[in-house]
Image: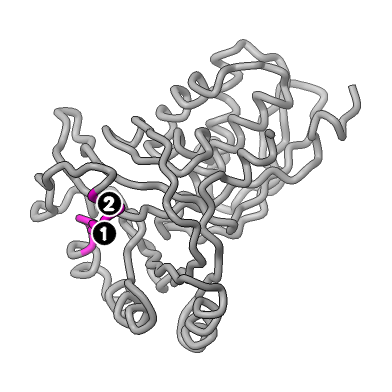
Amino acid sequence: MNKEIMGWGEKWPAPAKLNLMLRITGQRNDGYHLLQTVFQFTDLCDWLIFHQVDDERVCLKSPIPGVPEETDLTIRAAKLLKQETACKQGVQIEIEKNLPMGGGLGGGSSDAATTLVALNNLWGLNLSENKLRQLGIKLGADVPVFVYGHAAWAEGVGEKLEKIEPEEKWLVIIKPDCHVDTKEIFSVKDLTRDSKSIKIADFIAGQHQNDCLETVCNKYKPVKNALIDLAVYSEARLTGTGACVFAQFDSKELAEKAYSKLLEKWQVYLVKGLNTSLLKHKLV
């Protein structure tokens, strides 16, 4: 079969996500936190290219120096797919990394989801989206929403998804010069873990709180400073546990003005909010 039709050698998007709000409503016996959150995608992406190999190898084209290849989420995703389906094919994965590490934009999870979705297609495995989401949760709590590919109201540990249509606004994202450790934040004793559950209508009406905000700001001063600087232009919010902070704008022009000013001091991204991810678009 023609390689171009199959998509080998093409760029597959692994988009960034934002948490438009995040409430922690409890904690399970296994330590996982119960959440309510709203996911939306952006047009900022990592890009993955999948190359055919003539054996069963699963490898990276350019391994990160000092990082064991087997710990990379794309490698783990590919191997999990092979294990689940007894697939005898292999792949070499090339990653063009644009999403910052430790930024709360879901880079590793998105890369893993794109690997699951792309190789399911390229290897001709024909697993359902629901099955891919079930595999994704084994790799990370955010992986299922990237497989889902649509803005979602999420509950549980992030795996219970309901389609939602928030406004697709222009966004300015600041990446402070720090790497927030998600496990550290969720282990802090004073973290709010008993927020009252709300409904989608409450979010739409303006309830945008992030229960990790205070804890992250107390531990990471650059995040607090970024929020202060961004709040000059619009409501500034934390995505996930950070480190990235973001603000929505009603027009591209307003976003561009804020972006230009903030660029003098910060690592900044000007992006568009998307309810259907670029990965989902690729499969249509």
Classed neighbour count for the residue bearing mark 1: other residues with Cα under 10 Å, few (<14), some (14–19), many (≥20): few
The amino acid type, in three-letter code, at marker 2 is Phe
Which secondary structure dominates the residues rendered in magenta? loop
Residue 122 placement: quadrant? top right
In the image, the segment drawn in magenta is 202-213
SS type, badge 2: helix
Q: Name the side, left or right, on which 119 lies relative to 233.
A: right
Count of numbered circles in the view: 2
Which quadrant: the C terminus?
top right
Residue to which mark 1 is pinned: 206
Rendered residue at 32%/79% (across/down): 231
Looking at the image, do the residues carrying marks 1 and 2 touch, with CB atoms under 8 Å apart?
yes
Disc 2 target residue: 203
Give the answer, above or below, for where 239 lies relative to 262: above
Q: What's the residue at 44%, 32% (across, down)?
A: 139
For the residues labelled 1 and 2, the Cα–Cα distance comes to: 5 Å
Q: Residue 114 appears at what percent x and percent y?
A: 60, 38
The residue located at (19%, 44%) in the rendering is 198
- The quadrant in which residue 223 appears is bottom left
Quick one: 134 or 50, which is closer to the camera?
134
Observer-nearest residue: 274 or 17? 274
